[in-house]
Amino acid sequence: MQSKISLIENNYNQWAVQMKLYLQQQGLWSVVAGRTTAVDFECSKKWEDRRDQALATMLLDMHPRMQSKYIEYTDPVKLWTALETDLKEASSPSTHERRDGGRPARAPIAEPSGPPNPEVFVDFSEDVIGSLKRFDWILSNDSTANFTFIKTLFKTYATYPEKKAVATTTGQMLEAVGYGEIQLRLCTPEGVEQKPITISAYHVPALKVNVLSPMQVRHTVELSDDKWTIQGEDGSTIATGPVTAGAYVVRTRDRRHGGFGNRRGGGGYRRGAGAGRAADRAGGEDYYGAVSGGGTAADGGAPLATSSLAAGN
């Protein structure tokens, strides 16, 4: 990639700044801006080369999902215009209207970006599941959005009037009962706090793990054989961590209490002193086949019966 950011649906503004700077550096911005045309070149071959170079530069800096949407464009001017038209508003912060008293009203909570029919990867090994703590997340390229079973993590929250269908990579169907924004307090495996990030996520009580989609994290995510790294717009490291049990496990702290949550065991996580019970034991059978449930009452209740899910909700 040429810039620090790969274009997805909700980061156009940051991507456009980086891409314009790179195109200017390469002497291609005048082509994209429409200030240089075929009449400025002595032969059509030179013009076509510059046009194709500008076009390829933009397309190569997109997530594959975005490339497939815009690959048919042959004019870099039209491509740049189409990207701005399609994505600029979705990438901008929500505008807060004013109440009569002069205080800003709460902006509507945006649904997580990505495909309209979200899919979550759940086929994790027993070694991975056994290594997790309650507030851990797993980075999964096979998931199309971010998902959590813990309702109390959300800073903002909206409930679906009718539950939203969520497909799993094992063929089962789950239900998202709500969505909103979460601030993740990232930390190292040893507990050293790193920089926080904010994500949008679906609330799926029947899940037993929290799943992050690299394409839906609002930063550049790099995955290598032995570690994961989340980078800021300037290329600086926000957080990093090692591969754990063959998975990209991201450790976070509980935003309310600062703890991690104890390790899984005995059919569910256990909360800290004073809880005196398996916090996630709500009865029923989840997709791992364990009689443990998908969350506490605060998290949204027991696992949802997949047979009751209506397609298209």
Image (cartoon, rainbow, N blue to C red):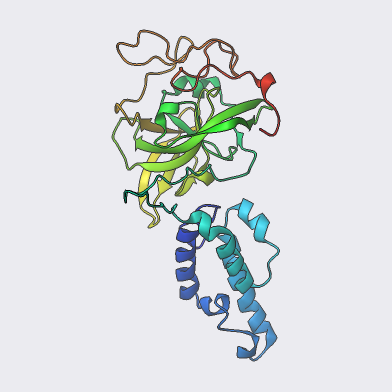
Q: Is residue 263 left or right of residue 313?
A: left
Q: Residue at x 64, y 83 (%)?
A: 46
Residue 6 visible within the image? no
Query: Residue 97 location in percent, x, y?
Result: 41, 52
**Number of callouts in the render?**
0
Q: Residue at x 29, y 36 (%)?
A: 193
Q: Is residue 258 left or right of residue 25?
A: left
Q: Residue at x 46, y 22 (%)?
A: 299
Viewport quadrant of the C terminus: top right
Query: Residue 59 location in percent, x, y?
Result: 60, 62
The foreground one among 250 and 258 is 258
Q: Residue at x 68, y 67 (%)?
A: 73
Q: Is residue 105 above or below residue 299?
A: below
Q: Is residue 170 left or right of residue 145?
A: right
Q: Is residue 263 above or below residue 313?
A: above
The foreground one among 73 and 255 is 255
Query: Residue 243 location in percent, x, y?
Result: 45, 34
- From this viewpoint, which residue is outermost toward the front? 100
The foreground one among 226 and 309 is 309
Query: Residue 183 location in percent, x, y?
Result: 38, 38
The foreground one among 4 and 202 is 202
Residue 194 visible within the image? yes
- From this viewpoint, which residue is outermost toward the bottom? 42
